[in-house]
Image (tube, rainbow, N blue to C red):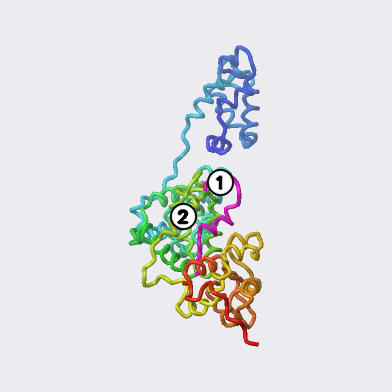
Amino acid sequence: MLRAAAANKGLDMSDAFESYAGRGRDANLGIMQKGRFNAAMTDMFKRLAADQQSLRTICRAYGTGDPDPREPGGYMQVQYKQFALDFDDVRLPSFRGPDVDALGPLLPALQQLRLFATKQKLDLTDAFEEAAGKGRDAQLGIMAKNRFRAAMGAMFKGECGFEVLNGICRAYGTGDKDPRDPSGASMKVLFKEFALDFDNMQPPAVNEPSPEAELMASLRQMRLFAQDKRLDLTDFFESYAGKGREAQLGLMPKNRFQAAVCDIFKGMTVPMRVLDLIATTYGAGDADPREPGEYLKVQWKKFAVDFDRIDVPPEKARQPFSQDMVDALSDLKGEAVRRKLDMTNCFESYAGGGVDYNLGVMQKGRFCSALAVLFPSISLSDALLRRICAAYPAGDPDQSPAGGTMKVQWRQFAIDFDESIPEPWHAGKAPPPRSL
């Protein structure tokens, strides 16, 4: 019991007695007056103040020097150094749980829990250390049964059934029997032995797709979404990267990268597993202490370049404009050629600044006004403006009767207009005079 108490307090008796021994010849010989030895032991182990018989037994076993006239069979001094060496060599009792093979019916349920722990990246040895608290039982790897059950419920969130918990408590029980439990389970559980056995257990094999194939399948779906929405990830990530050395190197903190991806692909569900696979594949910097095998930063620029290079099947690729849209914009193209307008440069003066400018988006009302100012000689119908805005949506939904979204991707529209709309046969000619 004294050795367990010393281990609980982290006491090294050889070092502890040095502060009580003082200096001189006796201290060098490892000898101490019996009264001082008793005081030191009582100070280190408070319970010995009420257990003088144990102290007398120790003093007689390690006594030296002149006999003590007040205590027959005792001595005036104690070999404290020898006692400390022998005390530190005493081995604590080992508490062993059952063999894993002996768990019988519990084994399949434990393997399913092991699979859940692997997916959630749970380490039971570390998790139980926080729940165990401090004290002698915690040092010995023992925990009260009700605390063990509460800890298991918090870690496995309902995955661990009542019968499985009872079986674990019976298999790894220790201490006095629980009078309230008819199955004969004990009041305490060997949590450390259970955690070690559990962490060493192999989870059942699951036929899951390889991470590379799963990631590529998800990225192709994201690429189709990006093509439909005309997203350029390199431009989008620029606004999230900020400034500084890391932004120049194309690096970004992992949490900011994952938030940026969710914001860019708004309207599409990107599973957390896909975000983790991307962060792992393009990880950089220091290792993440909370996620073994992952990193604290992500190479966003490399990911954006690789993403933009993903091939889209021809039958699923969306053309910038349908033929009826090309016909509708033909007059605008002819006017732009005649006046030598570069739409990208023209919209720059209306775009303003800030995050929206970096993303190439603009409020829908401002976009329509800009088109009306750029083409004053052409009557732009509301139906045509709605079609253009619907083809380049951005931002939150518009709750007004007009519908659509609150913003328009002006930069992508300008690029497609300059590159994809063919010049009409009358391009460059002055418009016919209006009849009076």
Q: Residue 246: which numbered mark, if any?
A: 1
Look at the picture and state if 320 lies above or below 355. below
Question: For the point 46% across and 39% down, which residue is it?
Answer: 93
Vertical position of residue 319 compared to residue 281: above or below: below
Q: Residue at x 36, y 68 (%)?
A: 313
Q: Secondary structure at mark 1?
A: helix
Q: Quadrant of the C terminus?
A: bottom right
Q: Amino acid at mark 1?
A: Glu
Left or right placement of residue 163 versus residue 104 in this view: right
Q: Amino acid at mark 2?
A: Phe
Which residues, given as a range, are shown in magenta?
229-249
Say whether disc 1 or disc 2 marks the residue closer to the N-terminus: 1
Say if the magenta span includes residue 233: yes
What is the CA distance from the residue labelled 1 to the residue labelled 2?
Answer: 15 Å
Q: Secondary structure at mark 2?
A: helix
- Disc number placed over residue 303 in the picture, else none: 2
Location of residue 41 (image quadrant): top right
Q: Nearer the viewer, residue 31 or 133?
A: 133
Q: Nearer the viewer, residue 187 or 34?
A: 187
